[in-house]
Amino acid sequence: MALGAVPLIFAPSITTALFWVLAICVLAGLDALLAASPRAVGISRQVHTPVRLSQTTRCELTLTNLNARRLRGTVRDAWQPTANPRTERHRVDIPSDESRRVTTQLTPQRRGDLYADRITIRTIGPLRIAGRQASIAVPGKLRVLPEFKARRHLPSKLTLLREMDGAAAVQVRGQGTEFDSLREYVPGDDVRSIDWRATARRSEVVVRTWRPERDRRVLIVVDSSRTSAARVGDGARLDASLEAALLLGALTSRAGDRVGLVAVDRKVRAQVPLNLGNNTLSTFADVLAPVYPQLVEVDWPYIAGLVTQQLSQRSLVVLLTALDPAAVQSGLLPVATRLSRDHQVVVASVADPELEELRQKRGDAQDIFVASAAERVQLERAAMGRMLSQVGVEVVEAGPEDLAPKLADTYLALKAAGRL
């Protein structure tokens, strides 16, 4: 169009201008007609899934030119913004009946299922002044798993577990243990452990020794109600609960226990039945990936029914929830009291590290009022913990980074003491 100024200098008239515009339109139309059709392209998508949050994966597009002409242009592979595509636009030059592959780098910033949008192909004609464009729907889904930062604690916890398994058999009694061996009676042994039949066959008194059962049952309950949406540190409370659930699930499965999972508020959002296998961690991560906080109140009687339905014998029940005073008194405390009669119950909650910072501020009058409010919250949470402990519930409370290893230590301590 700028070149049209040259003929206008020698023949300045409306006719010259219109003639030049018409010539440009004809050339553009001809160039567009000669461009390859963007719809005559075979497209296949391959997504390397699943991937953990903040890790990088690839989405590969295979483009086959079905036109009789050469295809030159640009291809855009569009994804949700949280998929964080690094290079979503690609230049292509594909001869007729040949294929090319383009790769889009994805570094997701949100867990769950992320979906691809349409693929847009823009071809350009041989004159490079016009072309054709079309958007084609090619479905694609990327499953983004939780980041699982607590994985770094797993080797040390497994070492403690192996030390427990390799230690001498402990003499404990009651439900939750299994027979290990016989040995000679020594003063101080519980007379109820004497094996009278074995004693009759020998000339000495022998007792049974027991070891913690390996095939115990552990059910992890993750609260996905509105309280799990609260921001604690850099993420939501639910994210820290998921980290703790993943570490505990991996540890219990390595210990030979049957472990199950349920994420629930007023209805079940994700569930894994009790199982015994080495793929527990991957299964947990897969089902928990699309779980997000729901802005509803948790239904604790419904959760109690789920636990009773799944567990027919004494088991370890881990409740990952918030120690909110109102929620504990009205819903959690009665349910935990009822469950603790038949099971070993552990309530694990994420503590807000910001509360401790607010408690330490004494700069001015406003800081003092804020510190007193934070102190009151801490005292109320401590009171809720004492109330739960009085009914036989183990309470674990720690910051977002410390909850997972602390819960794992609690599990190992209960197992070592034969309380599972």
Image (tube, rainbow, N blue to C red):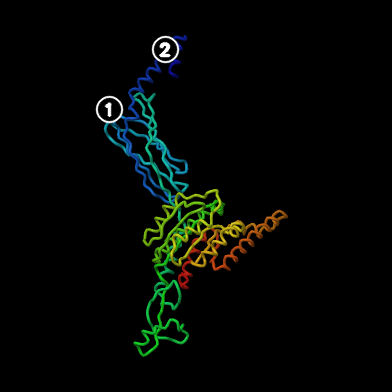
What element does badge 2 sit on? helix
- Residue 19's disc is 2
- The mark that comes first in sequence, 2 or 1, is 2
Considering depth in this image, is 294 or 3 the residue closer to the camera?
Answer: 294
**Which quarter of the figure is the N terminus placed in?**
top left
Please tell me whether residue 71 is drawn above or below residue 259 in the rendered image: above
Quadrant assignment, res 395: bottom right
Residue 95: x and y in percent read: 28, 32
What element does badge 1 sit on? loop
Cα distance in 3D space between marks 2 and 1 = 33 Å
Please tell me whether residue 146 is drawn above or below residue 393 in the rendered image: above
Residue 257: x and y in percent read: 40, 65
**Tags 2 and 1 touching, CB below 8 Å:** no
Considering depth in this image, is 186 or 136 the residue closer to the camera?
Answer: 186
From the viewer's perspective, tell me whether residue 317 is left or right of residue 390: left
Residue 150: x and y in percent read: 47, 59
- Residue 339's disc is none
Looking at the rendered structure, the kind of residue marked 2 is: Phe
Q: Nearer the viewer, mark 2 or mark 1?
A: 1
Considering depth in this image, is 278 or 57 the residue closer to the camera?
Answer: 278
Residue name at image x 40 percent, y 66 percent: 255
Looking at the rendered structure, the kind of residue marked 1 is: Ala
**Dot 1 crowding, Cα within 10 Å, few <14, some 14–19, many 20+:** few
In this rendering, does residue 163 appear at all?
no
Name, please, the residue furthest toward the right: 365
Residue 246: x and y in percent read: 45, 58
Quadrant assignment, res 59: top left
**Dot 2 crowding, Cα within 10 Å, few <14, some 14–19, many 20+:** few
Q: Which residue is mark 1?
A: 68
Residue name at image x 41 percent, y 79 percent: 209
